[in-house]
Amino acid sequence: MNSATQHIVARWEHFPHQADMGIRGVGVTLAEAYAMAARALTAIVTDPDTVLPRYEIPIEVHEVDDELLFVDFLNALIYEMATRNMLFTRVDVAINQHRVRAIAHGENVDVARHQPAVEVKGATYTELHVGQCEDGHWIAQCVVDV
């Protein structure tokens, strides 16, 4: 690891985009950037720190392109959130040969405690970017439909 990557702090961010919301994951590795983007996804709905890791939900997606893989990964999370009525506090991500294997840790929505703000409908190709920056950190971002 070079000295530039030693100062990178994994994080998630939101960025404005008309009526929808942009999410961005930043990490030392591509998997960490995906994990931070997953946290940003939850943070659109509620504070991820209020979500308890009661259940583990496996997620697996495969795609030949890193950017398409990212959208598929987010849409798989959104599907699990919608069909299971769950929120995720953390997602452990492993990426190998354009395949994501992840474990999403979370619980069922508790309206009183989580106070969900909106429902995320899907990840889009708008502002889609997955790549490594000059200083070595990774970014994974796109706009999600809310």
Image: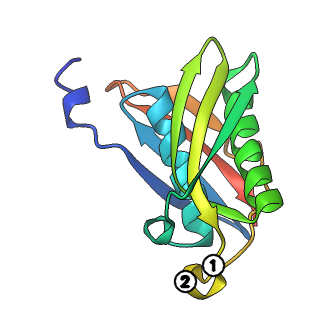
In the image, taking residue 48 as reference, residue 124 lies left or right, namely right
Q: Quadrant location of the N terminus?
A: top left
In the image, taking residue 49 as reference, residue 16 lies left or right, namely right
Q: Nearer the viewer, residue 55 or 115?
A: 55
Q: Residues within 10 Å of mark 1 (few under 14, many from 20)?
A: some
- For disc 2, the marked residue is 113
* Residue farthest along the top direction in this orientation: 97
Circle 2/circle 1 CB separation < 8 Å: yes
Q: Residues within 10 Å of mark 2 (few under 14, many from 20)?
A: few
Q: Quadrant location of the C terminus?
A: bottom right
Residue drawn at (53%, 60%) of the image: 14
Q: Is residue 16 visible?
A: no
Residue 16: percent from the left, percent from the top?
Answer: 59, 64
- Gap between marks 2 and 1 measured at Cα: 5 Å
Residue drawn at (43%, 41%) of the image: 26
Q: Nearer the viewer, residue 25 or 90?
A: 90
- Looking at the rendered structure, the secondary structure element under dot 1 is loop
Type of the residue with mark 1: Asp
Residue 62: percent from the left, percent from the top?
Answer: 75, 22
Residue drawn at (43%, 67%) of the image: 49
Residue 63, picture quadrant: top right
Type of the residue with mark 2: Arg
Q: Which mark is residue 110?
A: 1
Residue drawn at (60%, 34%) of the image: 102
